[in-house]
Image (cartoon, rainbow, N blue to C red):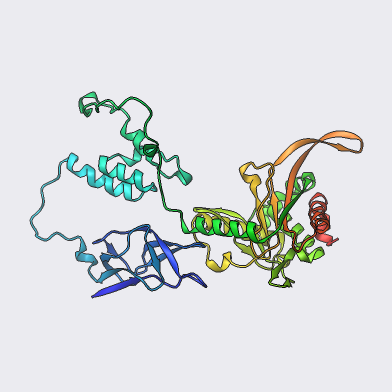
């Protein structure tokens, strides 16, 4: 009996997705609830499980195809798993020669490796050994240039060398030979849309300040071992900045508000979005009611988001909402940036790397660990004075962490 594999509900307001990857091919045996196909939306990646055990009978959509909720991705012949790969006759087949087995092995190995469509075509047509390929693309993805480099590499044994190709025509190669065209992922398309939306609908300005990280660094060094032993998580910088941002948001509520038509909606709760790196780019999961969480709870929540973002396990609900956002370009080495607000929010705090810099203290030049901070804000709602004072409040809380405990 054929069982349909359908596109499941994808979440509120999401109606379509892109087929990211099939984990099985036609004829393969599958078990019930085994992840068969990965769907990519503009928010999350979703694994579609097998509705029944059996064998894949049909595949209706290829990788890269757009699908909508309810579409039939393929069918499974229920109960056919045991016979899906069984031979037609009991007669034993002769052992294949090593050369004959190589293409199948290469094809099977290539299917499990991340590579661009052009690179995959080169690998499969030329039976390249994917184990020898090292990806130079994003996330270790194998590119066309990586595959061509392996193809043009001299063979180890002269006797097995293929005849030398005809000399290439003189002059520069056509640019088309050095270009690669790939589809933009749904997440990247959505990010692009929201960035353009933010730039075209909000009056974005950015104000800067610098913060001496010495007090926080000393506090972490003094209590790190006990904190880790008691809570099972390291004390990082993000929990300090979330707490400092919440204190500043309480003092300047318009930074925690949004514009809705002719109205201003003030949020009396603090759902802080924290930008983390996922497998497909930057995502912003939300720490709900951050003002009610302890430092340890904040560290655990942010750490959990980071781990699950890299394995595409964040849910749509965890990525929605948020009243204010914090992004840390410092982990990539950024010295300074002007972050773009996440609509309909009106503010975003940018953290950067910590560098030892000469500064004046009590008439003396000393070396201190300094971080530059940036606050981008919607000038339609927030005046420059409030923006500067907000950032100063964050600075004061970080330079004197006891303020966070005393709430002063």
What residue lies at 68% left-to-right and 49% top-to-bottom?
A: 338
Seen as rendered, the residue at the extreme bottom is 1
Answer with the quarter of the image where residue 73 lies: bottom left
Q: Position of residue 188 (x, y in %)?
A: 51, 55
Q: Position of residue 320 (x, y in %)?
A: 59, 67
**Left or right of residue 39: residue 357:** right
Q: Residue at x 37, y 60 (%)?
A: 65
Query: How many callouts does the rendering have?
Result: 0
Q: Is residue 384 left or right of residue 129?
A: right
- The residue sitting at 30% across, 45% down in the picture is 121
Left or right of 155, for residue 234: right
Residue depicted at 47% across the width and 59% down the height: 186
Residue 357 position (above or below residue 252): above
Is residue 304 in view?
no
Q: Quadrant of the N terminus?
A: bottom left
Q: Is residue 392 above or below residue 346?
A: above
**Residue 135: where, in percent of width, then height?**
42, 41
- Where the C terminus falls, by quadrant? bottom right
Q: Quadrant of residue 386?
A: bottom right
Q: Nearer the viewer, residue 111 or 97?
A: 111
Of the pair 42 and 95, the residue shown nearer to us? 42
Rendered view: 392 above or below 267? above
> Measured from the top left, where is residue 59 in percent x and y?
28, 64
């Amino acid at each position: 009996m054929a069982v349909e594999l359908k596109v499941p509900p994808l979440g509120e307001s999401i109606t379509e997705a892109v087929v990211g990857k099939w984990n099985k091919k036609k004829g393969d045996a599958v078990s019930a609830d085994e992840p068969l196909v990965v769907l990519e939306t503009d928010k999350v990646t979703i694994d579609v499980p097998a509705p029944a055990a059996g064998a894949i009978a049909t595949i209706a959509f290829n990788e890269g195809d757009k699908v909508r909720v309810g579409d039939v991705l393929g069918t499974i012949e229920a109960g056919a798993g045991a016979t899906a790969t069984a031979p037609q006759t009991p007669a034993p087949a002769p052992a294949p020669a090593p050369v004959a087995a190589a293409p199948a092995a290469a094809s099977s190995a290539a299917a499990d490796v991340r590579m661009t469509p052009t690179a995959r075509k080169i690998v499969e047509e030329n039976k390249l050994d994917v184990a020898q390929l090292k990806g130079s693309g994003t996330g270790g993805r194998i590119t066309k240039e990586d595959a061509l480099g392996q193809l043009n590499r001299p063979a180890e044994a002269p006797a097995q060398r293929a005849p030398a190709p005809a000399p290439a025509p003189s002059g520069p190669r056509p640019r088309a030979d050095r270009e690669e065209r790939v589809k933009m992922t749904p997440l990247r398309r959505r990010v692009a849309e929201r960035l353009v939306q933010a730039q075209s609908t909000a009056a974005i300005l950015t104000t800067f300040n610098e913060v001496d990280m010495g007090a926080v660094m000393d506090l972490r060094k003094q209590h790190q071992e006990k904190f880790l032993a008691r809570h099972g998580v390291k004390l990082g910088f993000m929990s300090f900045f979330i707490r400092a941002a919440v204190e500043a948001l309480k003092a300047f509520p318009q930074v925690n508000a949004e514009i809705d038509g002719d109205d201003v909606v003030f949020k009396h709760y603090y759902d802080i979005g924290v930008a983390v790196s996922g497998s497909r780019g930057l995502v912003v999961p939300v720490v709900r009611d951050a003002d009610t969480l302890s430092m340890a709870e904040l560290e655990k929540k942010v750490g959990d988001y980071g781990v699950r973002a890299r394995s595409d396990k964040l849910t749509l609900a965890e990525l929605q909402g948020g009243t204010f956002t914090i992004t840390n370009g410092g982990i990539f080495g950024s010295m300074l940036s002007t972050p773009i607000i996440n609509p309909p929010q009106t503010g975003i705090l940018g953290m950067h790397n910590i560098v030892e810099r000469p500064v004046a203290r009590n008439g003396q030049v000393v070396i201190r660990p300094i971080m530059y901070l940036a606050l981008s804000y919607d000038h339609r709602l927030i005046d420059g004075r409030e923006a500067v004072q907000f950032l100063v409040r964050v600075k004061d809380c970080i330079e004197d962490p006891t303020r966070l405990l005393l709430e002063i």
